[in-house]
Amino acid sequence: MKLRKFVDPLPIVDTVEPQQKNSKGAYYEVQMEEFTQKLHRDLRPTRLWGYNRQFPGPTIDVNRDDPIQVKWINNLPAKHILPVDRSIHNVAHHPEVRTVTHLHGSVTRPESDGYPEAWYTKGFKEVGPFFERERYDYPNKQRATLLWYHDHAMGLTRLNVYAGLVGMYIIRDEQEKALNLPKGNFEIPLVIVDRSFNEDGSLFYPRQPDDPADDLPDPSIVPAFLGDKIIVNGKVWPYFEVEPRKYRFRILNASNTRGYQLSLDSGQPFYQIGSDGGLMQKTVKINKLAMEPAERVDVILDFSNHDGETIILKNDLGPDADPEDETDEVMQFDVSVPLSGKDQSTIPRILTRIPPLKENNITAMRNLKLLGSTDEYGRPLLLLDNKKWTDPVTEKPQLGATEIWSFINITGFTHPMHIHLIQFQILDRRPFDLDLYNEDGRIVFTGKATSPEPNEQGWKDTVAAPSAQITRVIAKFAPYTGDYVWHCHILEHEDYDMMRPMTVIDPEDL
């Protein structure tokens, strides 16, 4: 299905207001409901699931250290709108529609983290075995940054997110406000996803891999899925009319599988000021932004010298791209709005200070393999350290401990690795001979360790771990104990079976 590009204006996602404020802070109620939304001028309304009946969900905008409570209300129908594989994670013995919201990147107690088995159904009639609650506490005791919330239900995350259960969450603080960055109408969140559609406008998601000769469950999970349309803030290939001045764009890759290599066809740079965990130490001038699923970037674009131009945000598909693939473009900027007033905002060179964790006392170093296998049906089964979700917990950092985790990727593609509870720092990546490893299991390095890219040197909660490389991160596990998870954030991988439990332990309990 062909859809004309750049015919719909970019929607600006609204900010949700709290129902009330009490001694525990602001209180919000957010409903998960089914609805229809027109995603393109020439596309019939699409049936979706969304927070407060919108896709993406409303932005939650809070101040650092101001705690809030959110009641995530499941008001979804009993039948899913996408094909549910009942052969994985005991799905056949649970309700078909289950949800639990995870605030990605948030420092929260385990009972408010959105544990995959803490799911519940409409009206809270059926619940999972962990931390079942509708009302979640978010202390917001962390640096100003862009987080995002999305569904995290065991075995259904890929489908619930694809159906529309995503939204942004912004934490602000005084340090960031003092930097004189573009703000108000000139600070724009961008939620980027890819989707495919049927002719009637409904979402397309495959029931099983392409070969009908495969004797597979029906429906059957696929190991990856790339949509053929790019959606920004709920519109397919939108345009955005801007003034000839500086804008701040807070960008989230909320796609299931797709990574992006973003650039501007005008040749102008991005000035990146922040990543997953907030402001970086220094502004990085960069011409191409690499974004794996779940990563966020905070950038300033300066349109001052582009009055009257149209500029396309491109996505580099690489030298072997299909010429019919239209996902090489994301959206269009039209520098067509008269300047409303003098642009007083700045692009600071120095942003903040980030103390290096490698100066801490390192109490553990974990070598964790990312590997591929097959299940009883011959389907790809991607695992962490050759263990499934149901295997006993093996990652048990002590409260307050600083550890180095080495992700050893022996698969053929990059995995975006996410650890709950904490923000980490990337230490380095080092290539090794994957063919030799596959022959005899030896790690033989083929080059020196390289430092992370300049725009990766801030706080992160999701890291690209490339094939045939060891990616090392360092983290301090605090301030809470309890049950969390770590996983690949390709949602098809996370659902089967590239996710593991993690327990942060109080050393006094040992």
Image (cartoon, grey):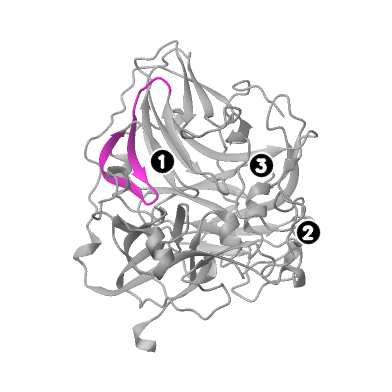
Image-quadrant location for residue 400: bottom left
Q: Which mark is residue 290?
A: 1
Query: Taking the image as drawn, is residue 100 in sight?
Result: no
Pick the residue in front: 308 or 181: 308
Q: Is residue 269 magenta?
A: yes
Which is nearer the N-term, disc 3 or disc 2? Answer: 3
Q: CA distance from mark 1 to mark 2?
A: 35 Å
Q: Secondary structure at mark 3?
A: loop
Q: Quadrant of the N terminus?
A: top right
- Structural crowding at the residue carrying mark 3, measured as other residues with C-alpha within 10 Å and reported as few (<14), some (14–19) or many (≥20): many
Q: Is residue 181 above or below residue 334?
A: below
Relative to residue 314, is residue 343 drawn left or right? left
Q: Quadrant of the C terminus?
A: bottom left
Callout 2: few (<14), some (14-19), or many (20+) C-alpha neighbours within 10 Å? few
Read off the residue under disc 3: 54
Hey, which residue is sitting farthest front in the picture? 439
Identify residue type, mark 1.
Ala
Q: Is residue 378 magenta?
A: no
Task: For label 1, count other residues whose C-alpha is less than 10 Å away and answer few (under 14), some (14-19) or many (20+).
Answer: some
On the image, the x and y values in percent for residue 62 come to: 46, 49
Q: Which residues are magenta?
A: 265-285
Q: Amino acid at mark 3?
A: Gln
Say whether residue 158 is visible: yes
Q: Residue under label 2, please give it.
A: 218
